[in-house]
Amino acid sequence: MIKESVELVDEYEVVKGLIGAFIVRDKATGLYLYNVVEPMLSDNASRVLARTRELLRVSSALPEGSNSVEGYLKSLVDETMGRLRIKLSDEELRGGVMYYLMRDTVGYGRIDPLIRMIILRMLILMARISLFTCGTVSMNT
C-alpha cells in the first residue's frame, strides 16, 4: 500500500512472479524512492536458509564435479532440510530459499533487485532508442 505522502511513478516486475519494484516520489521532498518487494519466508524456510548459509560459510569452494552453483546450493538445501527434518514446498524452496541463496552468493546481495531493475530499465530505454533510430528521416533543405 502506498502512503498518501508519496506518488507512484512506476512499477516493475523485476523477476516474474517473484520480485517487484516500485518507484515513488516523496511529495514533500521531491526525492525518488525505490521500493523492492521480495518473497517472505515461513519460519521453516527461514531456518533452512540460516542453516544453509552456515554450511556455506564453512565450505571453501564448489566440490569437484559440481556443474553449477545453483545445483550445489540445492544440494546444501536438501542436506539442511534432511538434518532439520523440514520439508518445504516447491514454492518455498524455489521462490524463497533458493532465491535468497542465489541473490546472496552469485548476485549482488541486497541490492540485486535494484541492479536487475536498472538493467531492465536500460534495456527498455535501448529498445526505445533502437526503434526511434531504425526509422528513416528525410529532411529537405
Image: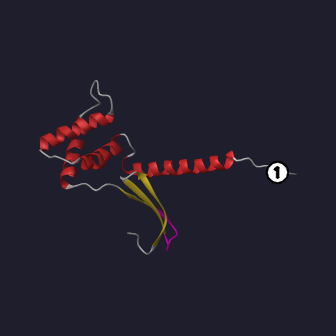
- First to last magenta residue range: 26-33
Residue sitting at x 27%, y 49%: 91
Q: Amino acid at mark 1?
A: Met
> Where residue 83 appears, x then y in whole percent?
13, 40
> Where residue 70 appears, x then y in whole percent?
31, 37
> Where residue 112 appears, x then y in whole percent?
40, 48
The count of marks equals 1
SS label for mark 1:
loop
Residue sitting at x 68%, y 45%: 134
Q: Quadrant of the N terminus?
A: bottom left
Can you identify the residue that label 1 sits on?
139
- Does the magenta-highlighted stretch encompass residue 29? yes
Report the front residue among 65 and 17: 17
User: Residue extending furthest right?
Assistant: 141
In the displayed structure, does residue 132 sit left or right of residue 1? right
In the displayed structure, does residue 115 sit left or right of residue 110? right
| Mark 1 burial class by Cα count in 10 Å: few <14, some 14-19, many 20+ | few
> Where residue 21 appears, x then y in whole percent?
42, 58
Report the front residue among 53 and 117: 117
Which colour style is shown? secondary structure
- Does the magenta-highlighted stretch encompass residue 11? no
Residue sitting at x 58%, y 51%: 125
Report the front residue among 129 and 72: 129
Q: Is residue 70 above or below residue 112?
A: above
Give the prevailing secondary structure in the magenta stretch: loop
Q: Is residue 6 above or below residue 119?
A: below
Q: Is residue 5 above or below residue 83?
A: below
Report the front residue among 98 and 64: 98
Residue sitting at x 29%, y 24%: 65
* Picture quadrant where residue 94 is located: top left
